[in-house]
Image (tube, coloured by chain):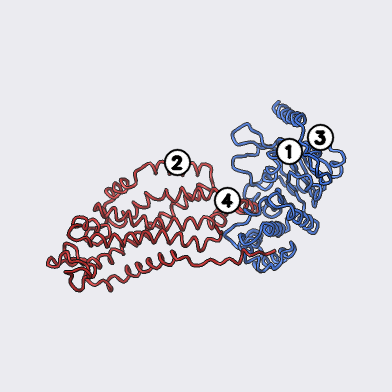
Chain colours: A red, B blue
């Protein structure tokens, strides 16, 4: 009676390997920045301003990705910028996820007045334009790492809450939930033992997606000069500075942009890849 | 002395006059198998859910008693009611495909309940689960316990659910259309299995179904339901020889006969339906006076 279903083995999807690889590389870069960065990211040298990257004519040895208009090493600044980007991604992403997913689970599974309150809050929240809202928040809170994280959490929790609520509602209607109830579990314990494991794949995908989004939001805020103090290198800040000298020194803009792009892409692919590999339900 | 007694149970859509159950009374003796038949929307599943405390939030019980082993469940505080139901009742659900948690292995899904709710030791619970899986004729129980639900067929999953329902030796099992989602050949095996398990464990069984053929195979008595009203309450043999209510008679006549494969299907006559509906409305009027 046993059929072949249990024999199916799933390979590690390439996108999982690639995205995880890139993110591990970034993580290492962030942690080891002081040792691997070739230059001091803040050191200026006006005689070495706007040096091109190492494969373009007119470069100087030691400046692999060139320098910006103040003579700061682009590679070193990207490496140091990784620290802020990843901190924001991990902290803001996880906090948003925990708050949003908890509210979504409660609303979707308990229903009743809990659902009504949370759902209305989501509706009202989503009517605010997010970028304007975050700029406003930072203006009130003052720039700094904590403010960025708070701004991202406050804006993005609805994304989790809405999706997880719908998912919890679907799972809540399944017979295995009724069985757990008959077996004497409380509503709350049912939520954690039966519903949560089944929305976990969705939470994972959303979480990694959110980490990417957090990086973009941080870059946007840096771009409008509302991130942390402007001395510390950030990817968004570098893109903003590079924009002004795009015709003379494209590399100042392009390299942080590529890093940002690859990172955000990797985060979203990581989530999908993890789900493909580990979600027990075959699709 | 019956094990389960339901007396004048009524249920409504919350905050609305729409009635779901109308003064339902029925009894299940210890070790008895009672069928609960009726067409879609008659409220048969709702009775099962009312007993087990899994009614949808939009439905509320407006009156009556559900007496399980001498205690009225509806009078107990929620926590006590839950433990009582968990201890003495179990459910064989309708759709085996959604009745197992897809993200957990089979073994823990059977044993967790024994360990968490009934405080068995893990080793005991696992031993018991293996025995039960063997009892429901599952080859290689060890391997099945390590499997995820999606790795097993529908029939296998229904067997597991049956095993799991009997695991804690409940006194009453509600089987909510346990064969409806299965194909005919598997249906027959599962019915046989439920009957076999019931006989071996002496459990009372409330068998919810719309299929009189199924009822005739496993039940000793049955209640016929229409519009949330119990029309008839008979011993099995009496019912098939001389159904008391015109609707039951029409329902029985509408059952397809395997001996007459060319015969066309007989619907329940409109006149009977109209008369029965009038009876339901009359019951409502007398309840309001």
Question: Looking at the image, which residue is at 19% across and 63% down?
Answer: A68
Q: Mark 3 = which residue?
A: B245
Q: Is residue A184 visible?
A: no
Q: Is the residue marked by circle 2 packed among few (<14), some (14-19), or many (20+) residues within 10 Å? A: few
Q: Where's the C terminus of chain A, which quadrant?
A: bottom right
Q: Residue at x 35, y 61 (%)?
A: A263
- Circle 1: is it few (<14), some (14-19), or many (20+) Cα within 10 Å? many
State whether residue B27 appears in this view.
Answer: yes
Look at the numbered disc 4 and give the secondary structure of its residue.
helix
Task: Please report whichever mark, 3 or 1, sits nearer to the chain's N-terminal start.
Answer: 1
Residue located 55% across and 49% down the image: A170
Residue A187 disc label = 4
Label 3, label 4: how far apart the Cα atoms are: 41 Å
Q: Toward which corner of the image does residue A253 lie, by quadrant? A: bottom left
Instruction: Point out the frontmost of discs 3 and 4.
Output: 3
Where residue A120 appears, as percent x and y from the top left, is 45, 41
Q: CA distance from mark 4 to mark 2?
A: 23 Å
Residue under label 2, please give it.
A120
Question: How far apart in space, not on screen, are marks 3 and 2 (Cα)?
Answer: 51 Å
Q: Position of residue B31 (x, y in %)?
A: 80, 52
């Amino acid at each position: 009676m046993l059929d072949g279903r249990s024999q199916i083995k799933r390979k590690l999807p390439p996108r999982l390997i690639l995205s995880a690889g890139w993110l591990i590389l970034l993580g290492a870069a962030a942690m080891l920045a002081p040792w691997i960065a070739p230059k001091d990211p803040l050191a200026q040298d006006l005689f070495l301003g706007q040096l091109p990257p190492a494969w373009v004519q007119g470069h100087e040895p030691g400046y692999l990705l060139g320098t910006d208009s103040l003579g700061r090493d682009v590679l070193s600044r990207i490496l140091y910028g990784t620290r802020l980007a990843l901190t924001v991604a991990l902290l803001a992403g996880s906090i948003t996820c925990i708050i949003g997913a908890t509210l979504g689970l409660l609303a979707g599974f308990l229903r009743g007045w809990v659902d009504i309150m949370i759902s209305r809050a989501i509706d009202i929240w989503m009517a605010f334009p997010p970028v304007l809202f975050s700029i406003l928040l930072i203006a009130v809170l003052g720039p700094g790492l904590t403010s960025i994280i708070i701004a991202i959490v406050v804006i993005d929790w609805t994304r989790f809450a809405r999706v997880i609520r719908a998912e919890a509602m679907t799972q809540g209607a399944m017979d295995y939930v009724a069985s757990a109830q008959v077996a004497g579990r409380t509503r709350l314990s049912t939520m954690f033992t039966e519903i949560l494991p089944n929305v976990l794949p969705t939470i994972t995908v959303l979480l990694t997606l959110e980490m990417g989004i957090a990086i973009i939001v941080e870059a946007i805020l840096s771009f409008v000069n509302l991130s942390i103090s402007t001395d510390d290198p950030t990817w968004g800040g570098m893109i903003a500075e590079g924009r002004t000298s795009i015709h003379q020194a494209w590399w100042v803009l392009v390299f942080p942009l590529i890093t940002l792009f690859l990172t955000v892409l990797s985060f979203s692919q990581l989530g999908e890849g993890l789900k493909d590999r580990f979600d027990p339900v075959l699709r | 002395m019956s094990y389960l007694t339901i007396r004048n149970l009524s249920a409504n859509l919350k905050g609305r006059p729409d009635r779901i159950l109308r003064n339902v009374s029925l009894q299940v003796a210890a070790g008895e198998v009672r069928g609960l038949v009726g067409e879609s929307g008659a409220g048969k599943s709702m009775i099962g859910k009312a007993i087990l405390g899994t009614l949808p939030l939009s439905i509320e019980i407006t009156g009556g008693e559900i007496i399980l082993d001498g205690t009225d469940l509806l009078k107990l505080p929620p926590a006590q009611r839950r433990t009582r139901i968990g201890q003495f009742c179990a459910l064989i659900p309708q759709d085996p495909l959604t009745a197992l948690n897809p993200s957990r292995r089979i073994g823990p899904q059977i044993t967790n309940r024994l360990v968490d709710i009934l405080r068995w030791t893990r080793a005991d619970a696992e031993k018991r689960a293996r025995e039960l899986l063997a009892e429901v004729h599952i080859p290689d129980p060890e391997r099945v316990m390590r499997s995820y639900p999606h790795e097993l067929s529908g029939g296998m999953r229904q067997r597991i659910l049956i095993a799991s329902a009997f695991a804690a030796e409940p006194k009453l099992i509600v089987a909510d259309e346990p064969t409806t989602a299965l194909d005919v050949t598997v249906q027959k095996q599962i019915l046989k299995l439920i009957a076999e398990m019931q006989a071996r464990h002496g459990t009372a069984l409330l068998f919810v179904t719309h299929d009189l053929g199924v009822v005739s195979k496993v039940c000793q008595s049955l209640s016929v339901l229409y519009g949330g009203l119990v029309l008839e309450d008979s011993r099995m043999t009496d019912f098939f020889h001389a159904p008391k209510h015109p609707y039951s008679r029409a329902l029985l006549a509408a059952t397809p006969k395997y001996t007459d494969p060319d015969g066309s299907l007989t619907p329940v006559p409109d006149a009977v339906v109209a008369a029965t509906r009038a009876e339901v409305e009359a019951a409502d009027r007398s309840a309001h006076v």
